[in-house]
Image (cartoon, rainbow, N blue to C red):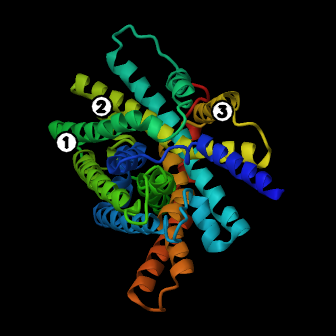
Amino acid sequence: MTFPVSSNKASKQKAIDDWLPITSSRNAKWWYSAFHNVTAMVGAGVLSLPYAMAQLGWGPGVAILILSWIITLYTLWQMVEMHEMVPGKRFDRYHELGQHAFGEKLGLYIVVPQQLIVEVGVCIVYMVTGGKSLHKVHELLCKEPCKEIKLSYFIMIFASVHFVLSHLPNFNAIAGVSLAAAVMSLSYSTIAWSASVRKGVQPDVAYGYKAKTAAGTVFNFFSALGDVAFAYAGHNVVLEIQATIPSTPEKPSKGPMWRGVVVAYIVVALCYFPVALIGYWMFGNKVEDNILLSLEKPTWLIVMANFFVVVHVIGSYQIYAMPVFDMIETLLVKKLNFSPTRLLRFVVRNLYVAFTMFIGITFPFFGGLLGFFGGFAFAPTTYFLPCIIWLAIYKPRKYSLSWCINWICIVLGLCLMILSPIGGLRQIILQSKDYKFYS
């Protein structure tokens, strides 16, 4: 008599999984992985890299950029490998991998808060980035006499797009948006460094630290570490992206996923290194925290670049919002027994977009937000949490090559997590003094 009940329960569970964003579609190709990862990683972070270089200096800046690229590629490989480490089971979400490594409750407590801080933080920063880029386009195109429009309104305009796109059900549904965003990221990165080359080395360029005190230099250095960490953020959605790729024992999903990741990281290198190094070379320590703000001419090219940024961060916002939607909808449907309906999805997603819009309007401090979120949340989930999970599960021999590499990544990631939020928080406070709220 219990068989029908069990069968009904299993079919109900399957129906819920088919409705939830992460598990509803598993027919993605390897190139979906490539452009989803490019969209997730290359975004607001690349525009701040010349500014980060100005705070770090040539030697430390180049070293940190290269080390970050290598370390995060390694930890991303670990996560791709661990997605199907248990035969017949897929860890479709970051917290599921954490639960396997640390236990059902502890895994949730360790992973979910950090992942939420990252994903919600990115959505807030991208609200600000999109609004500022639209504001910049208006400033460049508007001829005198030109009526000043508050930044708050441009953030609202940017948010209005997400009140529509957020109702696309899953990652595969936003594939077109993500592809456009990935193309835009390569485009505006190319415009950023090529326009910098065209402008040339500025007459009064200086490469020393801009802060007038030793304390200021140190805090700026810490904040710049967070800017770099923010630029490598794809780990927070990598398992969710891999969950959309079909998998069989003969052809596991890690093959096409890793192929896509390698392509994505090549694109990342083509975007990050030219923008960071050329932008700093041309403008020195006077470069803005968004490189496009330092470029005024040719006007049509900078307008185009800022428009490309808007298109890209629209896609990036959706990539980072999708796992948040999945968490909220899972909680409501599985734990609180709400029915999986369109109305539920409509309410949840609109409320989330409205929340990130409100916080973005209230705290539009681009540089400080990057430094704070980059160190506080991105460093753990990107630089060392995958290493800790790897050590907990595979238990490599002490002092072996694998053991040493993972502990080096953990130590560097911990330094990043502890130091960079200090500088980021200080920068937020300094910027807030010069900002008229709701301006």
Identify the residue shown where x is 61% and y is 51%: 117
Identify the residue shown where x is 38% and y is 86%: 401
Q: Nearer the viewer, mark 1 or mark 3?
A: 3
* Mark nearer the N terminus (2 vs 3): 2
Task: Decide if residue 50 is on the left or right side of residue 158.
Answer: left
Q: Amino acid at mark 1?
A: Pro
* Mark 1 crowdedness (10 Å alpha carbons): few <14, some 14-19, many ≥20: few
Q: Amino acid at mark 2?
A: Ala
Numbered disc 1: secondary structure:
loop
Task: Decide if residue 65 is on the left or right side of residue 13.
Answer: left
Question: What is the quadrant of the N terminus in the image?
Answer: bottom right
Determine which of the numbered discs, if any, sits on residue 178 in the image. Answer: none
Residue under circle 1?
203
Please say whether residue 92 is visible from this viewpoint. Answer: yes
Please say whether residue 431 is visible from this viewpoint. Answer: no
Q: Are marks 2 and 3 in contact (CB under 8 Å)?
A: no
Q: Nearer the viewer, mark 2 or mark 1?
A: 2
Residue under circle 2?
305
Numbered disc 2: secondary structure:
helix
Image vertical order of residue 377 relative to residue 141, above or below: below
* Mark 3 crowdedness (10 Å alpha carbons): few <14, some 14-19, many ≥20: some
Task: Tell me where residue 423 appears, x and y as whole percent.
Answer: 53, 57
Q: Residue furthest top?
A: 145
Task: Decide if residue 385 is on the left or right side of residue 184.
Answer: right
Residue under circle 3?
345
* Mark nearer the N terminus (1 vs 3): 1
Q: Amino acid at mark 3?
A: Arg
Numbered disc 3: secondary structure:
helix
Per the model, the C-alpha gap separating discs 2 and 1 is 25 Å
Task: Decide if residue 423 is on the left or right side of residue 310.
Answer: right
* Mark nearer the N terminus (2 vs 1): 1
